[in-house]
Amino acid sequence: MTSLPTAPCQNRRMAWLWPLAWLTALVIRLIYFWQIHDTELAQALLGDAEVYDAWARRIAAGAWMGDRVFYQAPLYPYFLGVIYALGGHSLVLVRLVQIVAGAFSCVFLGMAAEHFISRRAGLIAAALMAACPTLIFFDCLIQKSVLDVFFLSVVLLMAAKAAHQKQALQWLCLGASIGLLTLTRENALVMLPLLLAWAWQHARRRALLLVLAGTACVLLPVAMRNQLVGGEFHLTTSQMGPNFYIGNNAHANGGYQPLVPMHGHAQHEQTDAVELAERETGRKLTAGEVSNFWMTKSLNFIRAEPWPWVKLMARKWLLVWNAHELGDTEEQSAYAEHSSLLRWLSVFLHFGVLCPLASLGAVWLWPRRRELWIFPAVALTYAASVAAFYVFARYRLPLVPVAILLAAGGIAGIRDHIRRPVPASTWKGLAVLLATAVLVNWPVTSGQTEGMVTLQNLGGYFVEQREFERAIANYEKVLKHVPDSLEAHAGMGSALLELKRVHEAVPHFEKALQLNPKLADLENNLGNALAALGRQSAALEHFEKALLLKPGSAEICYNLGNSLLQMRRIAEAVAMYEKSVQIDSEFAESHNNLGSLLFQMGRPEEALHHFRSCVALRPKAAGAHANLGVVLSKTGHPAEAVREYETALEADPAQTAAMSNLAWILATCPDPAVRNGTRAVELASKADDITQHASPDVLRTLAAALAETGRFPEARQTINTAINLLESQGNHGLAEALKSEREWYQAGRPFREMP
């Protein structure tokens, strides 16, 4: 059993340095936040941030348990939920809390370095943490990374304190800390065996059991909650299988590639994983079965192609240690464009500087390896766990504090190595530093797309917010640097289509399909654009291709039905709408269109069913309520029809057809309980004003309403105007029908529509 030397933290005269370190870290982060707080980037919720925010809002509203097995690490959304519950929904407040937590991380890691190495190393570690641009960047993101660093710093501090002081509470806190870290970064659980070995080395079985107990106190309630709400035992989350597959398949490149191209948004991750797995297996799957499905596919690839997999793993290992910060949703370089502080610090303290300094520290601290083995062991084990999946800057972020701790040991030792005769260890350390510097700064990835992923995601965010001009501005920046960006062309096309700039949208969709011709969503969007241009045959071709690629899409069936309808292929359109509602019984638009066609085909009862389904799904859909009113009126339900028309007008007061139809019932219904002449005149007059006295149907209705209120001379004059309009249009049949109604008014009787 070994023990660490007494730490110099007992020097009370130097205690003020830790508050100073905390304040320094805080001020640096506040300066950075001030520089970026009013930018588009800071105000947008991109990718995971949007999911975490929505999740946290539900938690703050009282949904603490949730209703399914956790798919993403849960601690950060609950952290946000508590902030929202106490301080309201404020991203500024969240960032300020995270800045405070980040400043504490600097102090905790400095204290750990002080305990393990020396006071000088501790202060250097705290200073490096305070000024590290990557840590500053992540502390101000709406991302769980801030908690990754915080809890890892606590883990290292507890490991140092427990090994030195051997108090039961410290071992227990060490276990709890690794449990909490696992709830933000699931693969951190690989550190637990190392910490158990550390506990055994310093206090044998008692410490080992306390660490296990602390970890269990955190993780078992989460596992029990998953069992309770999802029916399966998952220690943390159920996303291991899909994540492992993303990093280990025939098309993997070491970074993140969504299961479905262009579905990189966190909202799609779980649904795509489930839908693809269930489509391939042909049955419904539990969360655990979905994870096993993807894990099995990965293992099959590894067994079938071991050598390509080995090369893939080698590439991922290099990416883990490379200086380049491989961004996903939000990139450090994009934020550095708005912050001189981040930009300046990124030149001097990036990972390509810290990692060589860490290797220097590891060599110079080698004589104390029995005391300090936990650091390189944690770093290498965690790095392997990242490489086993796929590499992102935020996934490898926990390596940064460990690298800083070892780098602090190296920097602290420089003075000693200068003062004394140069031993072999000095030259060995410098040689390793140089070799590591070359290795980690070797270009493994292209830097040409630096910052473009963030702008691309920002464009997608503005499309969701319906701020299409701002979306286009971001996509234009991306395409200027990356002309073959699939996502940017697709997003640009969508934004232009929404702005009715259809002619401009079509080339972007066509270019995107050249880049990837197997994307159903792109075929569907191009079909919509061509349909808007009136090119129905071309649109139909693309909708059919989209349906072949994605046969289970209710939306594509709906769009295909619309094109068939425009081409007057009614029976085929009905079949497509029917298929759409079979796939998704809640696709309201298909119910509405299907109801309209069935009514025209003389099948009113079936039409009623679909219109009722539509208004149940879209209570404020004015057109659907108006359509339902038409069918109810024609099938002998005037009172119900009146209610539907009134609802339609509440949703859209400018619906002239609904006004006119409602006024007709109120003026001509045989049931006196339904009739209301005054209201009929009001509605018909308004509709007549909107149509500028040029609609024969509206004039006919107004005449009936005037007659219902006893204003027969005006009724005769109004219907004469309608008859003259119809005859001028050549519609003599309807003109003759109105002449028969005029006879009622000439006789001083209001018209009654026979049931």
Image (cartoon, rainbow, N blue to C red):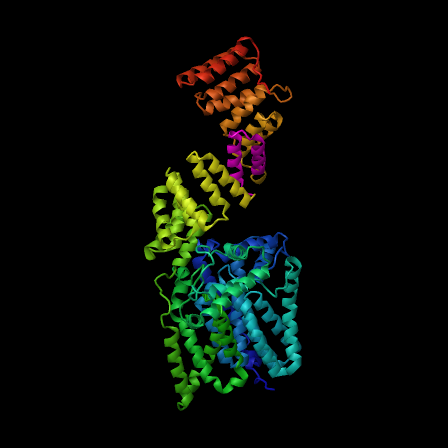
Residue 265's spot in the image, x, y percent?
Answer: 48, 55
Q: Nearer the viewer, residue 216 or 400?
A: 216
Q: Which of 346 and 256 is in front in this view?
A: 256
| Relative to 148, residue 40 above or below | above
Residue 584 is one of the magenta-drawn residues: no
Q: Tell me if 231 is positioned left or right of 691 in this view.
A: right
| Relative to 418, residue 38 above or below | above
* Residue at 37% over, 50% down: 473
Secondary structure mostly seen in magenta is helix
Q: Can residue 258 be seen in this view?
A: yes
Q: Where does the C terminus fall, quadrant-wise?
A: top right
Residue 1's spot in the image, x, y percent?
Answer: 61, 86
Question: What residue span does the magenta drawing correspond to?
Answer: 586-615
| Relative to 386, residue 637 above or below | above
Q: Is residue 28 visible?
A: no
* Residue at 65% over, 70% down: 216
